Amino acid sequence: MSKIVRALSADGSVLCAAVDSRDIVNEIHRIHRTTPVASAALGRLATAGVIMGSLMKNERDLLTLRLDGGGPAGVITVTADYRGNVRCCANNYNVDLPLNGKGKLDVAGYVGRQGLLGVIRDTGLKEPYAAQVPLVSGEIAEDITGYYAVSEQIPTVCALGVLVDIDLSIKAAGGYMLQLLPPVEEEKIAFIENNIKTMQSVTEMLDSGMTAGEIALLALKGLGGEILDEWEVFYKCDCSRERTGEVLVSLGRKELRKLGESGEKIEVCCHFCDKKYYFEPNEIKFI
Ligand code: ZN
């Protein structure tokens, strides 16, 4: 069970959202048959998506994170709804890289270090909110922090982690994000930074049995933090035959006619959940 918890400091100035996303990242591994480094990268970005999705306000709001770092992963895409349910995909899941200098999975090597993180928030307005920031390191948590600093001017601390087991399943995964709400006091930033320094890594904490709620309260230690709410989050794809048909339409009339005339069944596979949809040639002619 993956779970998100939101907590607030007693004076209302610091919000912390923490998530145990092990089941979600296991689902990513199962659907996309990811190698360990791909599990770590997609898992970290999906965990960020859970948190950022849960910070949206309205039922129909949709968040898309698009990470294009120029590495072997290609583009990694995560979408999240306002409850923090996510789905994700990448161009290439089958990449093995040697461990990095710190003996960790080389996420930045897989993502790439030079490129852009795009954040799109569709809140039902004519034009969705869209921003792009250059990557800080390709390790993802720093890139998310960089996005908030540059694009939204919100002081943010973000930690994300995925621990892969020997059998390639996910042993622990999760993350937390702290945000200072205005007016921002400098000494509070220092206080939180100090809290974070004394904490173990996310995966160490989760692997030792700590819950997302305990992690959130630990990050707010000394600030009288209290849990606001918590709920379950899932890997969830809302694809349908109808929407897949729309993808076919977007190929254009000429291309469709060619497909229809080939006389063979057309298979269209959802990039996010690997579900396959079939269209008969005569259906295609009439799309
Ligand atoms: Zn799907």
Image (spheres, rainbow, N blue to C red):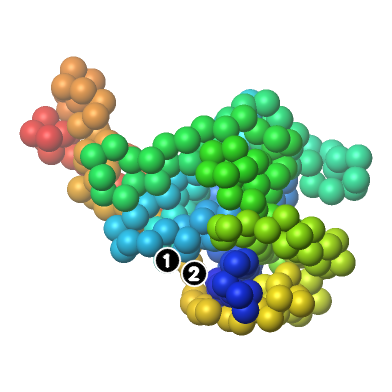
Q: Residue at 79% of width from left, 37% of height from top?
A: 97
Q: Is residue 240 visible?
A: yes
Marks 1,2: beta carbons within 8 A: yes
Residue 13, horizontal then vertical, whole percent: 60, 67
Which mark, residue 83?
1
- Which amino acid, by three-letter code, is at mark 1? Arg
- Residue identified by numbered label 2: 233
Q: Residue at 73% of width from left, 70% of height from top?
A: 219
C-alpha distance separating marks 1 and 2 = 7 Å
Q: Secondary structure at mark 1?
A: loop
User: Which sits earlier in the primary sequence, circle 1 or circle 2?
Assistant: 1
Residue 27, horizontal then vertical, whole percent: 55, 61
Q: Is residue 179 visible?
A: no
Residue sitting nearer the eye, 95 or 259: 95
Residue 4, horizontal then vertical, whole percent: 55, 71
Tell me if mark 2 has few (under 14), some (14-19) or many (20+) residues whose alpha carbon lies within 10 angstroms of its own: many
Residue sitting at the far top: 254
Q: Is residue 286 above or below residue 212?
A: above
| Horizontal arrangement in the rendering, residue 101 relative to residue 236 (left or right) | right
Quarter of the image that includes the C terminus: top left
Quarter of the image that includes the N terminus: bottom right
Q: Is residue 162 above or below residue 129?
A: below
| Horizontal arrangement in the rendering, residue 103 relative to residue 58 (left or right) | right
Q: Secondary structure at mark 2?
A: strand
Residue sitting nearer the eye, 8 or 61: 8
Q: Residue at 71% of width from left, 67% of height from top?
A: 172
- Which amino acid, by three-letter code, is at mark 2? Val
